[in-house]
Image (spheres, rainbow, N blue to C red):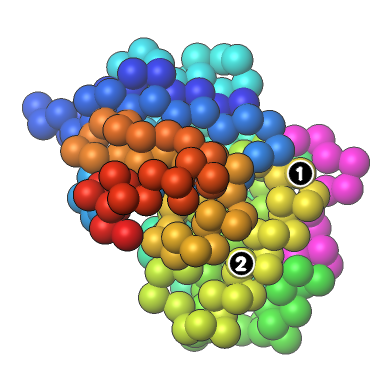
Amino acid sequence: MLALTNLQASYGASQVLFDVNLAVPDGKIVTLLGRNGMGKTTTVRAIMGLVPTTEGLHFDGVRISAAPPEAIARRGIGLVPEGRMVFPTLTVRENLVATAANRARRVEPWTEPRIYRLFPRLEERAKQYAGTLSGGEQQMLAIGRALMTNPKLLILDEATEGLAPIVRREIWHCIRTLRQQGQSILLIDKNMATLKRLADHHYILEKGRTVWSGDSAALARDAASIERYIGL
């Protein structure tokens, strides 16, 4: 579904991605790991067309390296950005409705009632302004807003960062539910214990390069050598 091959990207004259290789197959959960500042969020921005890239970025078999952000989103990539970035002066319901589109032409599309079944707390706060929600509630809303685009691929950048343990459990439960429903997901997070149980494949970035990839069994088996990359 998503394929990055020898991807490079720059901010102006400063090159930040040098050789990123990554693939997200249909219906799988793939993680992007690495310490802070190694290029994970820049890779996400490159995928979404927010950073100029070289050749090597394809989605559903189509080259999207030079496509504008809105065209990439319309192809079916939904983003939950780092920091959530909900619309603070819109209500929960308005945030959800603002992005609604059945881009993947799903038989059972994501709708407002279906989002509320996934996150009952959002229904309780449907008329509340998003800027007044807690951090955990805003993350639920950011996920719900991305799902309302009915994406083929969902990207979550720092899925549970800064959240209370009880809220993290709700987010992980949501991701497990999406996995069971066949949603393709690219996931960035630091909770290695959960990621090893949840994801199908993992990639590690260091200084803008893919330096390791493997499944969860390999991640556990190579823990000693991987420690220098992600500080396990």
Identity, as a three-letter code, of the amino acid under mark 1: Gly
What residue did someone put label 1 on? 182
**Among the two numbered marks 1 and 2 on one chain, the one whose residue lies closer to the N terminus:** 2
Which residue does the image show at 39% across and 75% down from the upper left? 162
The magenta segment: 103-115
Residue 226 position, x and y percent, is: 31, 46
- The part of the image, by quadrant, that contains residue 92 is bottom right
- The reply to whether the C-beta atoms of the residues labelled 1 and 2 are less than 8 Å apart is no
Left or right, 197 with respect to 122, comes to left
Left or right, 209 with respect to 201, comes to left
Q: Residues within 10 Å of mark 1 (few under 14, many from 20)?
A: some
Which residue does the image show at 48% across and 36% down from the upper left? 214
Badge number at residue 224: none
Q: CA distance from mark 1 to mark 2?
A: 15 Å
- Secondary element under disc 1, as helix, strand or loop, is loop
Q: Main secondary structure of the magenta part?
A: loop
What residue did someone put label 2 on? 172
Q: Nearer the viewer, residue 155 or 177?
A: 177
- Tell me how many marks there are: 2
View extreme (left): residue: 13
